[in-house]
Image (cartoon, rainbow, N blue to C red):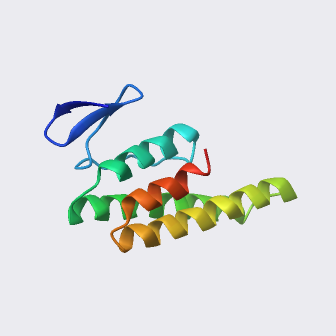
Amino acid sequence: MGQTGANQTEANGELVNPCHIVTVMDFSPATLRSIVAHLERSTSFEHLVYREAELDAVWSISGFLLSTAQSPAERAALMRLHYVAHQAHDLVGMSRPVEAADLLRTLL
């Protein structure tokens, strides 16, 4: 990772600045990778608040879809995502963003 500015790095062609909020519209691998990259760069209280909000969004979306999941396989995958998002959120709340990133990475 190369330094590109104050507290910014480039990862996988994406500019990662922990001062920016990741737009969470889904829980695609690209979205999860972006959250992981931002978690790994987050150092301040403000950064952690942003990461918690992003994980809340993943948790909410997965919970909504969980209520309409039809197949057992889809339901199991959504339950795992929902649980991991909750656990990662709690780790961020305990100022452990790198551990949260490691946990979230297990979904990729």
Q: Position of residue 108 (x, y in %)?
A: 61, 44
Q: Position of residue 42 (x, y in %)?
A: 28, 54
Q: Is residue 56 left or right of residue 67?
A: left
Q: Position of residue 97 (x, y in %)?
A: 38, 60
Numbered label tally: 0
Q: Residue at x 36, y 50 (%)?
A: 40
Q: Quarter of the image containing the N terminus?
A: top left
Residue 22 sits above or below residue 97 on the image: above
Q: Residue at x 54, y 62 (%)?
A: 85
Q: Residue at x 31, y 59 (%)?
A: 50
Residue 32 sits above or below residue 96 on the image: above
Q: Quadrant of residue 70?
A: bottom right
Q: Quadrant of residue 90?
A: bottom left
Q: Quadrant of residue 63?
A: bottom right
Give the residue at the far top of this rendering. 13
Q: Residue at x 78, y 53 (%)?
A: 74
Give the residue at the far right of this rendering. 72
Q: Is residue 4 left or right of residue 51?
A: left
Residue 83 sits above or below residue 47 on the image: below
Give the residue at the far left of this rendering. 6
Q: Nearer the viewer, residue 25 or 33?
A: 33
Q: Is residue 5 left or right of residue 104?
A: left
Q: Position of residue 7 (x, y in %)?
A: 18, 43
